[in-house]
Amino acid sequence: MPPLDPSRADAIRIRGARQNNLKNLDLEIRTNELVVVTGVSGSGKSSLVFDTLYAEGQRRYVETFSPYARQFLDRMDRPVVEAIEGIPPAIAIDQTNPVRTSRSTVGTMTELNDHLKLLFARAAVLHCRGCGRAVIRDTVETIRAALARRSRDAGDPRLLITFPVAVPENFSEAEIKGLLAGQGYTRIHQWRSATLHVIQDRFRWSAVEPARVNDAVEAALKMGHGRLDVFPQEEAGGTAAPWRFSAALHCPDCDIAYKDPSPSTFSFNSPIGACETCRGFGRIIGVDYGLVIPNATLSLRGGAIKPWQTDSYKECQTDLIKFARKRAIPIDTPWSDLTDGERAWVLDGEGEWTKNVWYGVRRFFAWLETKAYKMHIRVLLSRYRSYTECTACGGSRLKPEALLWRLGSPGADIRELMLKPIDRTREFFARLTLPPPLDEAADLLLGEIRTRLGYLTEVGLGYLNLDRQSRTLSGGEVQRINLTTALGTSLVNTLFVLDEPSIGLHARDVGRIVGVMQRLRDAGNTLLVVEHDPKVMQAADRLIDMGPGPGEHGGEIVFDGPLAALMHARGSLTADYLLHRRRVEIPPGGRPRPDAGTLRIEGAAEHNLKNIDVEIPLNRLVCVTGVSGSGKSTLIHDVLYPALRRAHGKPTENPGRHRGLGGAHLIDDVIMVDQTSIGRTTRSNPASYVGAFDAVRQMFARLPVARERKYTAGTFSFNSGNGRCPACGGNGFEHVEMQFLSDVYLRCPD
């Protein structure tokens, strides 16, 4: 390790770091470099990078804030280190995903939703929900241009310029005509639907002066409250269909008025734009008929309707068979082979049960809802409920009015852009040209959207869509999204601390993440990266290898320098494996296992899956691999796992699109092991999760002193009201809300 140089002003100097297993380290890290910290698991990498450098950088950053924020600093744990000098403000980009609400999406995390709703409010074009045509605000100039074009196409007919006047219910037609006559309007073209069409002027386009057209249009728009109808007269004396115009946000052909949009109109986190049924979540909890009919191979007589196979509701099964025979519905045909009309008859029925007709499965559950005040009914309903797509908004989370606004030509609404993969959304905005007149703010918005979409594609996240819920992202995906957010903020002179940003990336995509980190470095930042990937190590300006072993055998710097010098390092396990002095031996195959059958997924077509058929052998270790975004998680997480749970009658989300699932009867259960936190509370730890603390507490409770004082196992539990600290509730720390800053967790003084 090179000696410390106190004369250098462009370096971070650490003296006497003893956090966790660090052994009194002295270290100097030059700023504006990409530094990779590697080593075996438990060697002290995170203790140095996160618990020492980042913790001290964050603590000093908070010192610059108000006295309210600084009053907690004296109680914050400081890193165990003699001194740290020259450290800039620090930002940690790790793999933790603190988001638990389904309102958070990739779009909200990257702030792209904020930019999109501003752009839609400024530049989108409204399309009528009745006729589908674009709705624009007509002006004298646009109306005059339209009259010139239509008159030329229609052979220059005589035009009647009229404006509509609605007749209120408490007024007669004669009274309204009298009021109009007092203003000089005595000619009425027609009376229709309690509306008078009053003639403002009449002329042929080829013989009229422009000033007269302008005066007639302006006066008609004023008297018609922004609405104007032009009736072209035919040679036979009649009039053709009117040409309708409106100066408001109003479709003159369908007579539908619309409200002016605001950015909140396009936000599902605002009550203005959120769907009123699901309140912006996109899903509602209701009866899942996949749980009601879990086995589509059963017939109606064979028990396809699961809740009616019990003694409590066997009368409903009897009614089903009786009415099915009357209506010639097959009762011995598998449910999957029934026609759509036959299935609809079973589910929807014919009417209320009081009319002595088939009431249907839906009315059965509606009747159960009226009895939900009984505990056993609520338990029954919970077995057949799950989250399903909102029927009002179709999962878009927004009110229908928001989806009428479209960008570009032929155009896309905000929902369509949210559902596109990010790389295709990037292509859409690269081709998008906004029509004039638009202000400079719209151009800035468009440029920022293109930049952020480009960052997401560069870090290998082009396969995601902006509507993807944040809580479903892996740790590596969350870290890369946070990295693009940091790029978008254009920060300089900042210490970025990253925790294995290449995790979960295919080897093809590692180069992209390296390019993003180098761009951050070139902007004037310092990057400290905990990493094991050889490609990232090769791109580093400097490599720090921690070791030589884990735990108490680590905490030392085995190597510090450029990668080229690593080949001469001795005692470095990292060097041994990089230079192939050591290698991971593949263990010999175990004993042959008998054939246990296969799971078969047929016609998987969710997201980007192309109607594929997959067979997975049982009693084997099966790996699914491929480049980022190739459909691995879609196949396993979105299709196979929920389909297996549904086949076993367990509540789950709707499986992704697939034609069928075979072999589910060959397994007893299915368990998803992913990167989500296993603990439900902040008190959870590995020992309590596996139940090891139960035996330890009982041992303490059997001690003579504990028996003498009548202590129980709960007395030694931080989850019990008798045993846990009353100040912190058994957490070991106090949670202090810091308003607009990140919350602070302080060690409990008691």
Image (cartoon, helix red, strand yellow):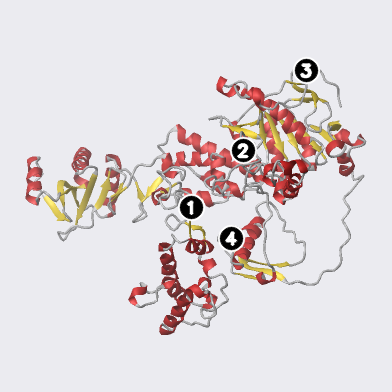
Q: Which element carries disc 3, helix, strand or loop?
A: loop
Check disc 1 and give the amino acid type: Gly
Q: How crowded is mark 2: few (under 14 residues within 10 Å), some or many (20 or more)?
A: some
From the viewer's perspective, is residue 50 above or below residue 82?
A: below
In the image, 106 versus 304, the foreground residue is 304
Q: Name the residue under label 3.
A: 8
* Residue of label 4: 606
Is the C-beta separation of discs 1 and 4 under 8 Å? no
- The span from disc 1 to disc 3 (Cα, nearest Å) is 56 Å
Mark earlier in primary sequence (1, 2): 1
The mark nearer the N terminus, 4 or 2, is 4
Separation of marks 4 and 2 at Cα, in angstroms: 45 Å
Q: Is residue 349 above or below residue 391?
A: below
The x, y position of residue 637, in whole percent, is: 64, 57
Residue behind mark 1: 282
Q: Is residue 229 left or right of residue 171?
A: right
- The mark found on residue 489 in the picture is none
Q: Mark 2 points at which residue?
A: 729
Q: Quadrant of the C terminus?
A: top right
Q: What residue type is labelled 3?
A: Arg
